[in-house]
Amino acid sequence: MATQEKPLEVRAEAKWVRISPRKARLVAEHIRGRSVLEARSVLAFTPREAARELDKVLRSAVANAESQHQIPDDRLYVSAAYVDEGPVMKRWRARARGRVARIKKRTCHITVKVAEIPVQEAPASKKQTKTKPKAEAAETPKRKAPAKKKPEEAKA
């Protein structure tokens, strides 16, 4: 038994993106496991701001795969897409009676990994393919169309 090789993964990362990680994770879930072409179309029609950032990272990962490993984008799929928390910028806002309110400006790190779609091995010989022989196909009964009911003759 031959050992199964782990598919080659190429990654791209965007750090310190000024989007809340919780909001970006909602979009990342939509592209995980899809082909690159399908993921790009999903991101193009997603109206969230995080979709644009994820699209940039996805395009970067595909460009890395094409330039470093000569893998065309139609043979790639999104093997992983995740969003980690980045540093939080803390700001203050003046409130009534001399008080302050804390404002947290969250950032995130977006990582997208693409891998080559595994190629299915072809059968060893043509005899193993599942095709019906002509003689067997002729023996299978064909469906008959349902008979039309004749309208009953009107009684006099």
Image (cartoon, grey):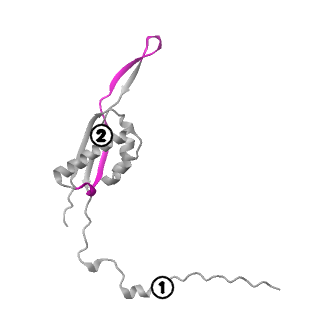
Quadrant for the C terminus in the image: bottom right
* Residue at x-position 35% and y-position 44%: 28
- Disc 2 crowd rating (10 Å Cα; few below 14, some 14-19, many 20+) is many
Q: Is residue 115 above or below residue 87?
A: below
Q: Is residue 40 above or below residue 3?
A: above
**Is residue 27 among the parts visible in the rendering?**
yes
Task: Identify which amino acid the numbered label 1 is placed on.
Answer: Pro
**Is residue 34 among the parts visible in the rendering?**
no
Q: Nearer the viewer, residue 66 or 14?
A: 66
> Which stretch did the figure color magenta?
72-100
Quadrant of res 89: top left
Residue 97 covered by magenta stretch: yes
Task: Identify which amino acid the numbered label 2 is placed on.
Answer: Ile
Q: Is residue 26 above or below residue 38?
A: above
Q: Which mark is residue 110?
A: 2
**Whole-percent x and y of residue 37?**
32, 53
**Whole-percent x and y of residue 70?**
18, 54
* Residue at x-position 68% and y-position 84%: 150
Q: Secondary structure at mark 2?
A: strand
Residue 94 covered by magenta stretch: yes
* Image-based side of 104 in relation to 119, left or right: right
Quadrant for the N terminus in the image: bottom left
Question: Which residue occupies the extreme right position in the image?
Answer: 156
**Whole-percent x and y of residue 57?**
28, 43
Q: Which residue carries the number 1 mark?
A: 141
**Whole-percent x and y of residue 115?**
25, 53
* Residue at x-position 37% and y-position 86%: 134
